[in-house]
Image (spheres, helix red, strand yellow):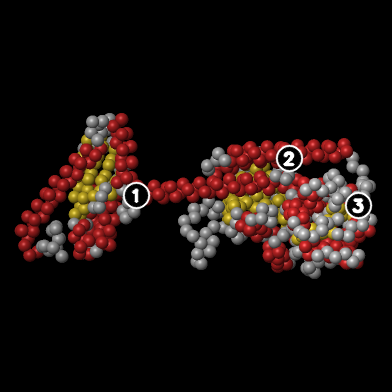
Amino acid sequence: MEKIIEIAVIVAGIDEEYQNSVIEGIISCAKENNANISCFSAFGGVLANSKYDVGEYNIYSLINFEKFDGVILLSNTISDPIEKEKIVNRVKKSGLPVSILDCSDYHEFHNISIDNFTAMKALVSHVIEAHGARIINYISGPVSNPEAADRQRAFSEVVTEYSIEVPEERIYHGDFRAADGKKAIDYFFSSALEHPQAIICANDAMALAAIEELNNMGYKVPDDIIVTGFDNTYNAKHHLPALTTVSRPLDDAGYKACEVILKVINGKKQKETIVLESKPVFTESCGCRTAEKIDIDEYKTATYKMLNSFKNDISLLNRMTAQLAENETPDENIRTVASLIHEVQCERFAICLCSNWDQVITGKASDEMPEIYQIQGYTEKMSAPLILVNGRNHPVTAFDSSDMLPTPVSGGGNVSYFLPLHFRERCLGYYVFINSTFPLKSLLCHALMLNISNSIENICKLLHLNSMISELDKLYTVDPLCNIFNRNGFIRTAGQIYNSCQNAGRKVLISFIDMDGLKYINDNFGHKEGDYALQHLARIIKDCCKSGRICARFGGDEFIILGANATDEDIPALESTFNIQLESINRIIRKPYKISASIGSIVTDATADVTLFNLITQADEIMYENKKRKRTSRYLRRDQEHDDVNYDTPWNYKA
């Protein structure tokens, strides 16, 4: 049986058009060759939140390179240079064959490059020669991005050739994101410099946003200002005015990147660098007529489908938001997601959670324990409470994170998307979409994942809150020294038992216990020994509470037992067991003092005209009479035994 090749794709922002087109080319080649693709993607740099970015980029630590035969690296989509370098170093260390897109920095990788430089030079030259622009501004991509560097270098060479000065104030450094286009226009027009005749942009997203902002300010493109882009995206083609830009064979680049990897895996030597050509597209935003005729019927059909898909996704997101907000347990959350996620048309969808996702955090970070919850990497064991296949859940209690998939896929030609599940920097787990276009094509995939992640974090907070409430309740109702009920806990529980017996016409047992000689132990041996004696007495009392009886420390050295469905025979049985246990513990611990206590018990009907505290008082009085008799008996024995008795103790105990 022929081995199925496994390829890892490392990318960021898969919902953007550049990444979409490249990945579609990769998938096309992989399917033709029956290879499996595992795409690991983050949305880092989207929300301008450094803690959020930590959680996003953590998805790359999930990759177990031992499971793959090759890697396709879109490092140019990862805006954080530190994260990019970490990923590159891990990929190098893997020793696997690697295709990288538009990056010539690593000679050990096969670089599938598109000639950005030549096409950008042609575009800038056209704006100067054909349209006479001399005052030109530039919106660049991130400085660390090789493509952005090539495009800016081409721009600089052309303006230098035409002896056009472009001071630093006329250059805005963006991150290839649409928001940078608006920010750039605001930056340019707040300057004292003369307004530009043309604005060259390093990509279409920034160019289109710049045009919109110019329109808001009352400027017309291209009548007042020329604007150009780069990438020839769908939106650029169908914008009004259509955007002068550069067309790049992105699908071909993705296809070639996968093809090269497959050939290397099969032992065929490949070129270190493959360069694909791009070409400028001169159209309306620079003042040229568009040469390409748009099929209006096709455009209307595509636009309707896109809007309808967006409407359906919004509906799904809203319904999921409303239902998740009602959930209070992990199971409720999983049921909600399972009931709705099938609408995204996914062959298989999984939520994989770290083993400590619901861990109750009780302390603060310190040098000894710098992370109080999961931040870097994933736990060795994961759970998958939701693996949705054909509308049915097939959960997995535990699997190794090194396997990545909670259950393996069968055959070749599969595409799996691994996306981060986190709250800010805190890692909760990850999502897996298998054989679905939703992560690529839906603008709401990221929003949907954020929604589910936040709901899981809310459940986690509820679990923590309930744990804290439980701890507070324990402090309120449980004696911390003796680990049995305190007075508050006894009152709460005893009232329920007493009312139950009252309604059923049954008798109750009440025993009141008072420790003998606690002051003597404290004064002569210290309070630590006094606490020790109280704890052992409490254990004996607790051992006497079988068959639904409860006990409590009622005061300093006072204890109480309450039992339901009692009979008169319970008193001698209980008190005999109690006294035998006392004798036994003293033989075992062999302390220079004796643990002793007096007990008084009653069994009586639980009636409406007698309160529980009336009965406790009766048991207390019986205990006190027993204590007095014990003292009298002790003093009589002491008088008879004379010198054989240690007179410092309040009972007959030979030192």
Find numbered disc 1 in the image and state the secondary structure of the residue it sits on: loop
Give the amino acid at mark 2.
Answer: Phe
Name the residue carrying label 2: 310
Q: CA distance from mark 3 to mark 1?
A: 80 Å
Q: Is residue 101 visible?
A: no
The number of callouts visible is: 3
N-terminal label among 1 and 2: 2
Residue 546, compared with residue 245, is above or below; it is above
N-terminal label among 3 and 1: 3
N-terminal label among 3 and 2: 3
Give the amino acid at mark 1.
Answer: Val
Find numbered disc 2 in the image and state the secondary structure of the residue it sits on: helix
Residue 50 percent across, percent down from the top left: 63, 58
Find numbered disc 3 in the image and state the secondary structure of the residue it sits on: loop
Residue 329, compared with residue 108, is above or below; it is above
Name the residue carrying label 3: 282
**Mark 3 crowdedness (10 Å alpha carbons): few <14, some 14-19, many ≥20:** many
Residue 280 percent across, percent down from the top left: 90, 55
Residue 173, compared with residue 541, is above or below; it is below
Front position among marks 1 and 2: 2
**Mark 2 crowdedness (10 Å alpha carbons): few <14, some 14-19, many ≥20:** some
Residue 112 percent across, percent down from the top left: 83, 61
Name the residue carrying label 1: 478
Q: Residue at x 76, y 38 (%)?
A: 307
Q: Is residue 487 visible?
A: yes
Q: Is residue 629 left or right of residue 348?
A: left
Q: Nearer the viewer, residue 414 or 422?
A: 422
Q: Look at the numbered discs 1 and 2 and tell me whether their residues touch, using CB distance below 8 Å.
A: no
Residue 216, compared with residue 163, is above or below; it is above
Query: Would you identify the image quadrant in which residue 649 lies?
Result: bottom left
Q: Residue at x 53, y 43 (%)?
A: 329
Give the amino acid at mark 3.
Answer: Phe
